[in-house]
Image (cartoon, rainbow, N blue to C red):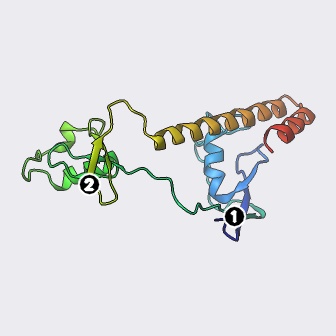
Amino acid sequence: MPDQGSSETVVKCPVEGCDAEKLSRGIYLHVRQSKGNGHGPQGETPTGLSLDNLESTGTQKVSMDYPETRNTESVGRECPYCKEVFRGKQGVMVHLGRAAGEGQHPKDPKQNHDGSEFSIVRTDDSGSVVDRVESGTMLPATERRLQRDEEASLHDRVEEYISDLRDRGMEEEAERAEAKLLD
């Protein structure tokens, strides 16, 4: 169900030569994922760049579309020693750290495990194990995350193309591409 929306601050990118304006919550990602126009290598934040006290350029109304119900999976990771089920690999690792040396749990589990070998199990509403997920099976949540990453990657490539057009002084072409590709 969509919320009524709220106003969020829009800030100017602090990288000299970049005129991008982004929601304040997205400026770090913009700087880190952009390249060219002084941003440095993609995936890195330029050394010495501060994201504190950014120039505000206004506000933008933002609303979130919250679903009536969530499409979540009833899956978890199983402790190989006591068969207790946890949400994710990290949950099992925390459990192993707390249970170190107790019962069948090893004294130093982090030396024995990196999380990749924990069985994935499907659970019912009460958390009881229903069945095991076959090794190598991609869970629907992983498929959705990979799809989102692929879409984000495409968006990044489009932004990079437009930035490249601007770097080459082709402002009119960049504006046309931006109008067609990013809207």
From what the image shows, is residue 101 above or below residue 171? below
- In this orientation, does residue 81 appear? yes
- Quadrant of the image for the C terminus? top right
What residue lies at 21% left-to-right and 42% top-to-bottom?
110
Q: Residue at x 15, y 54 (%)?
A: 99
Q: Quadrant of the N terminus?
A: bottom right
Looking at the picture, does residue 165 appear above or below residue 58? above
Residue with the mark numbered 2: 128
Q: Distance of mark 2 from mark 1, alpha carbons?
A: 37 Å
Pointers 2 and 1 in contact (C-beta within 8 Å)? no
Of the two numbered discs 2 and 1 in the rendering, the one whose residue sits closer to the viewer: 2
Residue at mark 1: 63
Residue 59 percent coordinates (x, y): 76, 65
Q: Where is residue 102 drawn, in percent x and y? A: 8, 53
Q: Earlier in the sequence, mark 2 or mark 1?
A: 1
Q: Residues within 10 Å of mark 2 (few under 14, many from 20)?
A: few
Q: Nearer the viewer, residue 48 or 149?
A: 149
Kindly tell me whether residue 44 is visible in this rendering: no
Left or right of 116 on screen, residue 96: left
In the image, 108 versus 51, the foreground residue is 108
Residue 116 pos. (x, y %): 30, 36
What is the number of callouts on the image? Answer: 2
Type of the residue with mark 1: Ser
Nearest to the observer: residue 20 or residue 141? 141
| Residue plotted at (27% across, 39% down) | 119
Q: Residue furthest right?
A: 172
Check disc 1: other Cα within 10 Å, few if <14, some if 14-19, many if 20+: few
Circle 2: residue type: Ser
